[in-house]
Amino acid sequence: MENPRSNSSLKAIIAVLAVLLIGSLIYIFKATSDAEVVQTELKSTVSEKDSVMKDLQELKATYDAAIAENTSMSDELIQERDKVVNLISDLKKSKGDVASLAKYKKQFFALQSNMKVLMAENEGLKKENAVVSSQRDSTVVVLGEAKKYNEVLVGQNEELSKAVEKGARLTILNMKTSAYKMRNSGKQIETDKASRADVLKISFTIAENQIARSGDKTYYVQVIDSKSNVLGNKKTEYFGDSSLVYSFITNVKYENKTVQVSEDLPGKDFAKGTYFVNVFDKNELIAKTSFTLR
């Protein structure tokens, strides 16, 4: 009777051990499967964190490039860029669990949406600035050309004024000086001897000039003998900082036609040698000649 009982006990023990073995195998399989799932989820989470980090870095680079263009929106762009920088810093410190990654991805999409709006506004502003700059450059070119044209006109007007002024000056022609001996009868006899001369006759012609101003003209005549003495009245006239010692004044009524001028300068004891005769319009020398008495 003992053998059957022993066999039954042995079978029971074997059955229990089999059940325990099967249970252990099932537990080990399930634990292994759970570990693989956790490891897979962990790898996925790390990969997702890297992806979000990369997206944020690209977003920051986009803002950096836009800020470098230095538009009027730079302050707004800097503020948004700083938000991205702060989010990058927070993401680096995070544990990288699914919940926190979902939060960061949500914030990234919000920042990305703001970036698209700001970039569109910035591009529009750049185009407007380009148009304004082009218009300004065109205006500068036009103004520069107008300035050059005005400078040319001013130069031409100055040259024309100078030409008119020069053309309006009266020209002295045929200036001549001779010495004469005055007879008792009043007749004058030309001589070249200093001892015989008692009057010098200075004559010249004022040429016709239709663009000159008509009216009374005053000329200062200066006669200098061979000893550098001014003959005649020896009066002094001042013209600003300059002065002129002259022999006599001749007044002429000029009406834009040729005028003959002749004046006598009486004298005595004329010196031998070369005489110089100058005609001045105020302090400007306009004609000169010379003659010699022996």
Image (cartoon, helix red, strand yellow):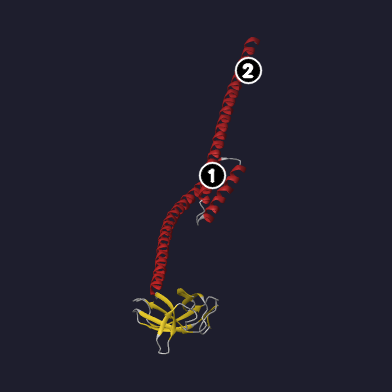
Depth check, front residue: 140 or 152: 152
Say which mark, if any, is on residue 157. Answer: none
Q: Tell me where residue 25 appears, x and y as whole percent.
A: 58, 23
Q: Tell me where residue 89 appears, x and y as whole percent.
A: 60, 45
Depth check, front residue: 239 or 135: 239
Above or below residue 25? Residue 172 is: below
Question: Which marked residue is nearer to the observer: mark 2 or mark 1?
Answer: 1
Say which mark, if any, is on residue 13. Answer: 2
Depth check, front residue: 153 or 269: 269
Residue on which the image places disc 1: 56
Q: Tell me where residue 94 appears, x and y as whole percent.
A: 61, 43
Which amino acid is tagged 2?
Answer: Ile
Name the secondary structure under disc 2. helix
How many numbered marks appear? Answer: 2
Residue at image position (52%, 51%) is 67
Q: Tell me where residue 172 appears, x and y as whole percent.
A: 40, 75
Above or below residue 121? Residue 153 is: below
- For label 1, the crowd category at 10 Å Cα-Cα, with few meaning under 14, some 14 to 19 and many 20 or more, is many
Q: Quadrant of residue 188?
A: bottom left
Which amino acid is tagged 1?
Answer: Leu
Name the secondary structure under disc 1. helix
Q: Give the CA distance from mark 2 to mark 1.
A: 64 Å
